[in-house]
Image (cartoon, rainbow, N blue to C red):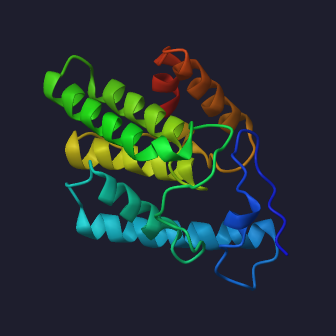
Amino acid sequence: MLSIRYPEGATPIDQNEAQGLLPSNITTQGELDRWEQENIIEAITWLDKAKPKDILNEQFIKKLHKRMFCNVWEWAGTFRRSDKNIGGSWYQIPMRLRNLLNDLELWIDLKDESDDEIAVRFHHRLVEIHPFPNGNGRHARLMTDLLLENILNCTRFSWGSENLSKTSNIRQKYIDALKEADELNYKPLQKFVRT
């Protein structure tokens, strides 16, 4: 039986979701972390080759999550079917995601904000929607980097230049910046993503 230790601010998966673990030989948090990281590296390699431009749709958002976690979780690429401590009711995910993507297209067309501001707002909203049982932060960061690189023709964010999946001061700064964005103060998150 795998015992998952969640870093501060992480959303726990429920028992049914935990049963979706594919590799039966994983017994420690370290093994789970390694499997997930290797799967994410495979997804990044695929992205670097494919350089997809048609990313601002529900199908691609699911496809990316599946690519990131398909070797680890049975439910990779499918929206969560349980409520969490973040993200609102699970049944609202498709509608909220559609609203975000419509807003994003408008922000890009209007050009009222800088590319970084657009990307930060997109990232915050995607994290807030929390569409998947697990991996939402990592997925939202990669989606945001794809938006920056493949749509806005900008450089990727540095995301504090550290691994945000582990408990650390940098992770806490990231979570604090997201909480400020919850209050519509995006400046701390804008500063954080470029440090």
**In this view, 65 is above or below 99:** below
**In this view, 66 is above or below 154:** below
The part of the image, by quadrant, that contains residue 106 is: top left
Residue at x-position 41% and y-position 30%: 120
The picture places residue 94, in percent across and down from the top left corner, at: 39, 46
The part of the image, by quadrant, that contains residue 194 is: top left
**In this view, 72 is above or below 93:** below
In the rendered image, is residue 195 in sight? no
- The answer to whether residue 79 is left or right of residue 48 is right
**Quadrant, the N terminus:** bottom right
- The answer to whether residue 117 is left or right of residue 139 is left
| Foreground residue among 33 and 13 | 13
| Foreground residue among 31 and 159 | 31
Residue at x-position 49% and y-position 56%: 79
In the rendered image, is residue 72 in sight? yes
- The answer to whether residue 53 is left or right of residue 191 is left
The part of the image, by quadrant, that contains residue 107 is: top left
Residue at x-position 29% and y-position 39%: 101
Residue at x-position 61% and y-position 24%: 179
